[in-house]
Image (cartoon, rainbow, N blue to C red):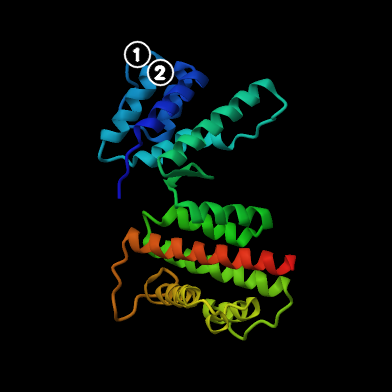
Amino acid sequence: MRRLIPAAVLAVVAEITSSRETHASLDNLFSYAGAPGEPPEGSKAVKAQAWLRLTNKDETVDPLAVLGKLLEVYMEEPLDPNSTWDVQKLESRQRIQRVLAQCQLRYVDGGRVTGALAAPSRTLEEFIRDRDIASVDDEFSRALINVETNPREAVSAASNILESICKVYIAEENIEAPAKLDLKPVWSVVRKHLGFDPGSLEDQDLQQILSGIISVVDGIGALRTHASSAHGAGKKSYRLEPRHARLAVHSAHTVALFILESWQRKRAT
């Protein structure tokens, strides 16, 4: 699905690029990013705004792909917080991050701007960074990158997020690993070790929720097997749409967060 650069993002990016670049470097930057047409006339700020609007209008161009390349150097260049000039660059970077988040977007390393997942995913990302689980972070980024453009790949990533967390849990807790290291067997080991047993709860509402979580994990694993890029297509054809992939990724992130929070609580007791 082709998404336009939101007006709020357009305004901030035009302001920052025009303040940081000369006319010549601004032209080079937009050309490098794949912005269509010749440089518009006017001041640097007028030029940047006009070029971004033209990018939105040109049906042959992916506006978010252009935006990602425009932001790449601003978001990824090494900065020294003790340098006065770099402090200003850091402030610009934070402005970009804030306006992207306000518009349900996110910058991903490598010059990509993708649709942002909602609060459960952002909370999960904080847990991942705190624990420094690199394999989960990789899958989180892959899901974000592909949820709109490649739903099958995003579903595969959603399953791998859970699978990676379970494998890390088994390794760090010195639990005997199952013979098969696919999602269903590793999840079974982890949920038993963490006490995710609906029958052990007195509250019927919590029983239903926990039973639902178990079904969600089974469903994500099955969807990965039957419809994701991880396996060849079988007899039944799944017409995955971004909304289906987003549902799988959201669900995987919610379950992953519950695992991580429960793990943290278990270690604290």
Q: Cα distance, mark 1 to mark 2?
A: 8 Å
Write the residue at 70% across / 83% down: 176
- Number of numbered discs: 2
Give the residue at mark 2.
45
Write the residue at 60% across / 34% down: 77
Are the residues at dot 1 and dot 2 in contact (C-beta closer than 8 Å)?
yes
Vertical side of 155 occupied by 180: above or below: below
Q: Determine whether the residue tagged by mark 1 lies in a helix, strand or loop.
A: loop
Vertical side of 6 occupied by 168: above or below: below
* Amino acid under disc 1: Gly
- Looking at the image, is mark 1 or mark 2 nearer the viewer? 2
Query: How many other residues sit within 10 Å of disc 1, few (<14), some (14-19) or many (≥20)?
Result: few
Residue 29: % across, % down: 45, 28
Split into 4 quadrants, where in the image is the C terminus? bottom right
Residue 182: % across, % down: 54, 78
Query: How many other residues sit within 10 Å of disc 2, few (<14), some (14-19) or many (≥20)?
Result: some
Write the residue at 29% across / 79% down: 236
Give the residue at mark 1.
42
Q: Determine whether the residue tagged by mark 2 lies in a helix, strand or loop.
A: helix
Residue 139: % across, % down: 53, 60
Left or right: where does residue 11 sit relative to residue 161?
left
Vertical side of 98 occupied by 110: above or below: below
* Amino acid under disc 2: Ala
Write the residue at 55% across / 32% down: 93
Residue 103: % across, % down: 40, 40
In the picture, the disc for residue 10 is none
Residue extending farthest bottom:
179
Identify which residue, 119 or 219, lies in the foreground.
119
Residue extending farthest top:
43
Identify which residue, 144 or 188, lies in the foreground.
188
